[in-house]
Image (cartoon, rainbow, N blue to C red):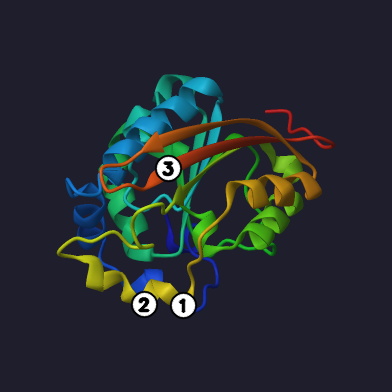
Amino acid sequence: MTAPDRRRDTSEHPWRGIDLGVYEQHMSDARVGQLQQLHHITGEQLAAYPSRTIGVLGVAGGNGLDLINPETTDAVYGYDINADYLDACEALYHDTLGDRLHLIETSIDRSVRIEPVGLLIANLIVEYVGAEEFAAFAAANAGSIGVLSCVIQRNDAAGFVSSTDYASSFDALASVSSDIDPEALDSAMSDAGFAALGRCEYPLPNGKTLIRQDFRPTIVVARL
């Protein structure tokens, strides 16, 4: 993949300064367990909505891409704001996905246009975009989305960033992160023209809960 295919204009953002290894060690810490649970959830998302074209917002190092069957997949589009994450993702998954894998460096907001996909996965992305802006992004891309499956976190018994030896590396994210209420996300997505398909909850070791919410455009349905 060439740099022009990879990169879009992005402003400075705290996620661009967080090392992938630190992120993955923090997320997979036994006290957190989010990386393992997200891998499991991605498997459920792929199984629930089989699609030949798949998009992943916040693809990072590609957690879950190993679950994609290249024989039944035409294209995988991974979006992330951190170019180093995308480099790692390409190194890990190019051999299995080959030319099906397309990686794009970009932030996520209403100005971004994505490639048409049958399934768009957005796990732990809405917290860094905001429910209203994320819904505006979804509305702007409704014709390119078959199903949009999101995961947010509910912080019942812990702070926004879980406590680990690496937690201080994420201090800068406080300027761009916010708790997302699942009801508020449902409402924002409904206003954006998306119908809720269902909701699942996944408890974590530290008292947090991951919440998966799935949506489908109600007016324009992608033919993928």
**On the rendered structure, is 65 left or right of 130?**
left
Residue at the disc numbered 1? 175
Residue at the disc numbered 3? 210
Task: Kindly identify the amino acid type of the residue bearing the numbered disc 2.
Answer: Ala
Query: Cα distance, mark 3 to mark 1?
Result: 22 Å
What's the residue at 27%, 38% (across, down)? 36
Q: Secondary structure at mark 2?
A: helix
Confirm whether residue 46 shows in the render: yes
Give the farthest residue toward the right.
219
Answer above or below: position of 196 versus 209.
above
Q: Residues within 10 Å of mark 3 (few under 14, many from 20)?
A: many
- Place of residue 15 in the rendered image (x, y in percent of width and height, measured from the top left): 39, 69
Q: Quadrant of residue 87?
A: bottom left
Tag 2–tag 1 contact (CB < 8 Å): yes
What's the residue at 45%, 49% (across, down)? 153
Task: Kindly identify the amino acid type of the residue bearing the numbered disc 3.
Answer: Leu
Q: Secondary structure at mark 1?
A: helix
Return the mark for residue 172. 2
Tag 2–tag 3 contact (CB < 8 Å): no
Tag 3–tag 1 contact (CB < 8 Å): no
Task: Kindly identify the amino acid type of the residue bearing the numbered disc 1.
Answer: Ser
- Place of residue 1 in the rendered image (x, y in percent of width and height, measured from the top left): 41, 52
